[in-house]
Image (cartoon, grey):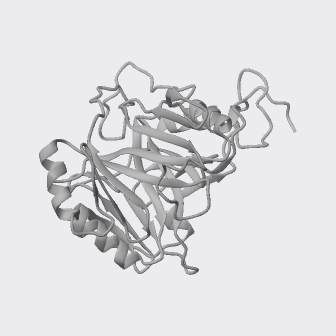
C-alpha cells in the first residue's frame, strides 16, 4: 500500500490579492475566494490552498511566513488510509479525523493523508521525433501561449537532519530513495513505480528548515516554455530557467512566488521502477542544471531577458555589418 502523490499544498501569503494574481497567471483555476483564503485547482483537481498568514486555524509554520504550512498526500481508498493510520498512530503528533490522518515530520511540518479526489485525465501531449523513432507524422509540435499545470508534482524542503527525515518518510510513509547527494540530499518517490521524485530534502551547512520550492507538472517541454514566457509577459520574476536537470532529466523553469520561496514548471522527468538502483551523486552547479538561462526569456521578444527583439520577417532580414 502506497501514497499516490500530492493532493494539496497549504501555503500562506502576506498579500492575498498578489497571490491570486500570481496563481491565476500560473494557470490554476480559482475555485474559492474569501477575505482570508484562496483555493486553486490544477487540471486534475490537485489543490493549492493559500491563506492569510495570521489565520489561527493553520498548522504552525516551520519558518517565517510566507511559506508552506502543510502537505496533504493522497491514497486510493479508505483501506489504504487506515493502513497509514495504523502505522502513524503511535506518534505523539498523530491526529485522526473522519477522512484524514495527520502527523508532523521530524522538521515539525504538518503532514496529512486523505483519500484522493483527483480526477483521471486524458491529455494530448507533444510527440517527439528522435533520430531512430519518427512518431510525429504530418503534424507540428504544439505551441503554448500559457501553461495549465496538471498537478503538484513534488516539493523540495530544507531539513536540519537529513538522515532522520529521510528515514521517517521511508519507514512510516513508504517512500523509496531514487538518488542521493551523500550527506546532503535525498530524492524520494512515494511509489516504487513512478516519476523520479515526489519529495527532495536538502540539508544545508547552516542547518535550517523551510521550503525551497513547489513544482508543478505540465504536459511537455513545450508547455514549460510557453508557461514561462507567459509569466514573464505578466511581469513575474524568473529565478532560473528554462533549463534541464541532469539528475531527473526534467526540463524546468523557476519563478519567485508570493507564497514563499520558488515555484517550478517541469516536464519530461525520468520514470523509475523497483529495478532502478539509486545513485550517489556529487552535487554541484552542473549537476543541478545541465544548462540553464539565468533570468529567463522575455515573453514579448521571445529572446533572453534584455536581448534585442528580432526585426523583419526572417533572421536574414538584418543589415550587413
Direction from residue 27 to residue 217 in the image, left or right? left
Nearest the eye: 101 or 310: 101
x then y, percent, for residue 296: 66, 45
x 41%, y 76%: residue: 162
x 40%, y 39%: residue: 151
- Quadrant in the picture for the C terminus: top right
The answer to which image quadrant residue 25 occupies is: top right
Direction from residue 39 to residue 19 in the image, left or right? right
x then y, percent, for residue 61: 52, 60
Determine the residue located farthest toward the right in the rendered image: 321
Direction from residue 227 to residue 84 in the image, left or right? left
Nearest the eye: 170 or 114: 114
Determine the residue located farthest toward the left in the rendered image: 79
Nearest the eye: 54 or 5: 54
Q: Is residue 42 visible?
A: yes
Nearest the eye: 143 or 86: 86
Indicate whether 145 appears above or below 256.
Answer: above
Determine the residue located farthest toward the front in the rendered image: 56
Direction from residue 307 to residue 100 in the image, left or right? left
x then y, percent, for residue 265: 50, 43
x 73%, y 32%: residue: 301
The answer to which image quadrant residue 98 occupies is: top left
Q: Is residue 289 visible?
A: no
x then y, percent, for residue 155: 44, 54
* Total tally of numbered discs in the picture: 0
x 19%, y 53%: residue: 2
Amino acid at each position: 500500500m502506497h501514497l499516490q502523490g500530492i493532493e494539496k499544498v497549504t501555503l500562506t501569503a502576506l498579500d492575498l490579492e498578489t497571490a491570486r494574481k500570481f496563481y491565476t497567471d500560473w494557470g490554476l483555476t480559482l475555485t474559492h475566494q474569501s477575505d482570508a483564503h484562496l483555493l486553486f485547482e490544477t487540471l486534475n483537481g490537485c489543490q493549492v490552498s493559500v491563506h492569510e498568514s495570521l489565520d489561527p486555524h493553520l498548522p504552525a509554520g516551520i519558518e517565517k511566513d510566507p511559506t508552506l504550512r502543510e502537505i496533504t498526500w493522497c491514497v486510493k481508498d479508505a483501506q489504504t488510509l487506515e493502513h497509514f493510520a495504523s502505522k502513524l498512530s503511535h506518534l505523539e503528533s498523530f491526529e485522526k479525523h473522519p477522512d484524514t490522518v495527520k502527523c508532523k515530520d521530524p522538521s515539525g511540518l504538518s503532514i496529512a493523508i486523505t483519500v484522493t479526489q483527483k480526477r483521471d485525465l486524458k491529455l494530448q501531449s507533444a510527440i517527439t521525433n528522435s533520430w531512430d523513432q519518427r512518431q510525429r507524422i504530418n503534424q507540428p509540435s504544439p505551441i503554448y501561449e500559457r501553461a495549465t499545470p496538471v498537478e503538484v508534482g513534488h516539493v523540495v524542503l530544507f531539513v536540519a537532519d537529513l538522515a532522520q527525515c529521510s528515514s521517517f518518510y521511508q519507514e512510516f510513509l513508504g517512500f523509496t530513495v531514487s538518488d542521493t547527494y551523500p550527506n546532503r540530499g535525498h530524492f524520494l518517490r512515494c511509489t516504487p513505480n513512478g516519476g523520479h521524485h515526489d519529495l527532495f530534502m536538502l540539508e544545508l551547512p547552516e542547518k535550517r528548515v523551510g521550503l525551497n520550492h513547489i513544482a508543478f507538472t505540465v504536459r511537455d517541454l513545450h508547455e514549460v516554455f510557453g508557461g514561462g514566457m507567459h509569466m514573464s509577459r505578466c511581469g513575474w520574476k524568473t529565478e532560473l530557467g528554462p533549463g534541464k536537470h541532469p539528475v531527473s532529466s526534467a526540463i524546468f523553469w523557476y519563478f519567485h512566488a508570493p507564497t514563499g520561496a520558488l515555484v517550478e514548471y517541469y516536464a519530461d522527468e525520468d520514470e523509475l521502477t523497483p529495478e532502478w538502483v539509486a545513485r550517489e551523486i556529487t552535487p554541484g552547479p552542473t549537476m543541478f542544471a545541465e544548462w540553464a538561462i539565468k533570468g529567463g526569456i522575455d515573453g514579448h521578444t521571445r529572446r533572453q531577458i534584455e536581448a534585442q527583439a528580432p526585426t523583419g520577417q526572417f533572421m536574414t532580414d538584418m543589415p550587413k555589418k
